[in-house]
Amino acid sequence: MKTKSFVEINSEWSIIQARRLGRSLSKYVGFNQLEQARITTVITELARNILLYARQGIIWMEIITAGGKTGLKITARDQGPGIKDIRDAILDGYTTSDSPGAGLPGVRELMDEFDINTMEGEGTTVTTIKWIDGTRL
């Protein structure tokens, strides 16, 4: 199995493809079913944000190792409008759409590492990592 893969996000179907790929990679790495479900939830949230706010983007998934641990790194990147205020965007309940606002805060909670970079008018990149042992760095 490839240790790096990506899915271009541009439709509901591409979200399904990204979820399938994420589940396959997380299963291959050795995550249990609960962690696989969490990872696919994260992928869904990131992909839906891409569709909702930028219309298109990409989700990269990569099996990584560091310090004797194995994990799955998920990066969502778009060239949309960017996020005006990151601090607000990662607060539970904050939303600029009709959604419940659980997206980015939920992603941050479900993963061991979370990083977001954005620039208004240039896009957003969200990078997350889930380690097989669940240890937060």
Image: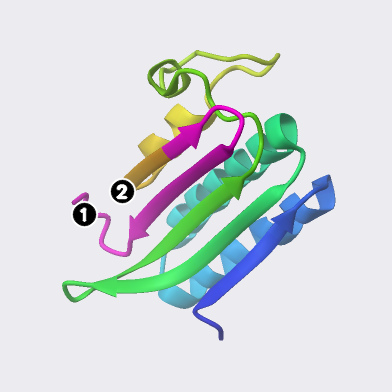
Residue at image x 66%, y 35%? 80
**Side of 24 where 72 appears, left or right:** left
| Local SS, label 2 | loop
Q: Residue at x 68, y 16 (%)?
A: 97
According to the picture, the residue beneath numbered tag 2 turns out to be 112
User: At which x and y percent is residue 85?
Assistant: 45, 18
Amino acid type of the residue that numbered disc 1 sits on in the rendered structure = Thr
Q: How many marks?
A: 2
Q: Quadrant of the N terminus?
A: bottom right
Residue assigned mark 1: 135
Q: Are marks 2 and 1 in contact (CB under 8 Å)?
A: yes
Q: Residue 128 in magenta?
A: yes
Give the magenta range.
117-137
Classify 61 as above or below 94: below
Q: Position of residue 54 (x, y in %)?
A: 71, 36
Q: Position of residue 111 (x, y in %)?
A: 37, 46
Magenta includes 89?
Answer: no
Residue pushed farthest bottom? 1
